[in-house]
C-alpha cells in the first residue's frame, strides 16, 4: 500500500536554564504527541561551541520516561542521581530510564568544538513507569549495503538487531544514504514510524523532507521507500501506537494533572538554595545549581493521546 505521509516541521525552543542552547523540536506537536512510545524529538547543531557555549544543562528531574541521547558530532558528559557517569559519543546510544524518578546533568566536554545530535524521549507504559531508575550504553556496529549504512540502536531493522531491552516494542536507527540512492526498508506493519532528516534532501514515499523535518507514517505498511537527492542522514523511529493517554509537562510524564503537580512539588522541595537534598529524584554529583521547575499553568494539563 502507499503510505500517507504527514510532515511535522520543527520549531525552535531553548533548552536548559539561563544559558540555554537552541534546539529544533518536532515532537510533541499540537496534533501529534507520540509515534509509538517516542514522545519527544529534539534536533540540534551543528553548533560551534566557541560561539554558542555548547550544552550546559544543570541537574533536572524526570519521571515516567526514558531519555535516548544520540550524537552526530561532539561529546557530552552525562551524570545522574543513580550514580551513572558516561560520555555520550557519536554513534553510541546512551539510554537513561527515569521510571519512579531520577535527575541528571548534561554538559558538552571541553574538547568538543562542534555539537550536533538528537535528544529523544520514550514514554514508559503503565506497568513500567514506576520502575527503578537505570542506565544503559550500546555502540551498534554499522550494517551496510550498496549506497547505504545504518546503526540500529533499538529494535530490529535492515537485518540488524539491538540487544537493549525496551518496555514496549520499538525501533530506533541512524541511516545514511548516498546521493541518488533509493532504499526500500522492510518494516513491521503494526508500527507507526517517524523519519527525522538530519542533513541532505530526501523523499519518503514521494514526499520531500527538509533538514529537521519529521515524516510521520501510520501503521499498515510493510515497506518504506526513501530516496536521497543529496547525501543524507536521518533517524528512523517507530513502534506500535502507544495506546495509553499520558500527561506530559516540563520533564515529567504522568497520567493526571494532580500527579504532575505532585512531581513538581517533590522536586522543588529537594532544591535548597539551588542545591539538591535527597528525595524521589536523588542527587547528582556535580558542582552546579539545579534547575527549578517552572510555575504550573493556570489551566489543567490535558491528556495527550
Image: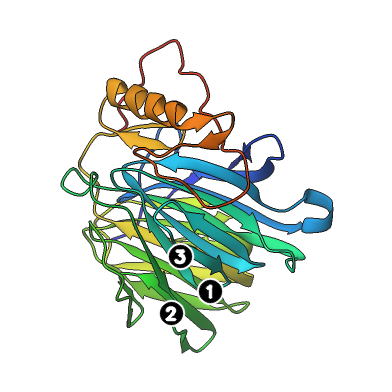
Q: Is residue 121 left or right of residue 24?
A: left
SS at circle 1: loop
Q: Secondary structure at mark 2?
A: loop
Residue beneath disc 2: 140
- In percent of width and height, residue 250 lies at 46, 32
Q: Quadrant of the C terminus?
A: top left
Q: Nearer the viewer, mark 2 or mark 3?
A: 3
- Tell me if label 3 and label 1 are in contact, CB under 8 Å: no
Residue under the image location 46 percent in, 27 percent down? 268
Q: Is residue 60 left or right of residue 19?
A: left
Give the residue at x 56% y 38%.
290
Q: Quadrant of the N terminus?
A: bottom left
Residue under pointer 3: 94
Question: How many C-alpha atoms fall within 10 Å of the one at disc 2: few (<14), some, or many (≥20)?
Answer: some
The image shows residue 284 at horizontal and vertical percentages of 49, 49
Observer-nearest of 93 and 220: 93
User: Of helix, strand and loop, which one carries label 3?
Assistant: strand
Question: Which residue in the rendered view is the most extreme toward the top?
Answer: 298
Q: Position of residue 267 (x, y in %)?
A: 43, 31
Q: Which residue is mark 1?
A: 91
Q: Is residue 143 left or right of residue 171?
A: right
Mark 1–mark 2 Cα distance, whole angstroms, equals: 7 Å
Amino acid at each position: 500500500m502507499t503510505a500517507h505521509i504527514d510532515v511535522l516541521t520543527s520549531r525552535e525552543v531553548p533548552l536548559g536554564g539561563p544559558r540555554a542552547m537552541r534546539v529544533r523540536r518536532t515532537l510533541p506537536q499540537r496534533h501529534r504527541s507520540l509515534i509509538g512510545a517516542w514522545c519527544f524529538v529534539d534536533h540540534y547543531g551543528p553548533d560551534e561551541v566557541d560561539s554558542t557555549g555548547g550544552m550546559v544543562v544543570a541537574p533536572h528531574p524526570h519521571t515516567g520516561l526514558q531519555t535516548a541521547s544520540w550524537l552526530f558530532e561532539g561529546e557530552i558528559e552525562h551524570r545522574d542521581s543513580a550514580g551513572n557517569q558516561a560520555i555520550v559519543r557519536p554513534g553510541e546510544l546512551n539510554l537513561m530510564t527515569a521510571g519512579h524518578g531520577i535527575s541528571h546533568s548534561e554538559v558538552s566536554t571541553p574538547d568538543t568544538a562542534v555539537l550536533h545530535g538528537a535528544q529523544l524521549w520514550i514514554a514508559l507504559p503503565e506497568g513500567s513507569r514506576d520502575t527503578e531508575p537505570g542506565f544503559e550504553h550500546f555502540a551498534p556496529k554499522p550494517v551496510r549495503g550498496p549506497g547505504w549504512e545504518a546503526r540500529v540502536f533499538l529494535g530490529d531493522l535492515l537485518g540488524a538487531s539491538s540487544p537493549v531491552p525496551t518496555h514496549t516494542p520499538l525501533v530506533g536507527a541512524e541511516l545514511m544514504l548516498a546521493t541518488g540512492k533509493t532504499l526500500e526498508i522492510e518494516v513491521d506493519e503494526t508500527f507507526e514510524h517517524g523519519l527525522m532528516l538530519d542533513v541532505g534532501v530526501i523523499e519518503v514515499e514521494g514526499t520531500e523532507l527538509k533538514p529537521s523535518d519529521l515524516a510521520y507514517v501510520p501503521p499498515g505498511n510493510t515497506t518504506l521507500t526513501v530516496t536521497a537527492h543529496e547525501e543524507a542522514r536521518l533517524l528512523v523511529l517507530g513502534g506500535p501506537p502507544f495506546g495509553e493517554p499520558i500527561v506530559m509537562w516540563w520533564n515529567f510524564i504522568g497520567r493526571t494533572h494532580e500527579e504532575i503537580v505532585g512531581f513538581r512539588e517533590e522536586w522543588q522541595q529537594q532544591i535548597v538554595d539551588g542545591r539538591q537534598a535527597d528525595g524521589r529524584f536523588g542527587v547528582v554529583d556535580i558542582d552546579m545549581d539545579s534547575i527549578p521547575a517552572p510555575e504550573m499553568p493556570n489551566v489543567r494539563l490535558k491528556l495527550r493521546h
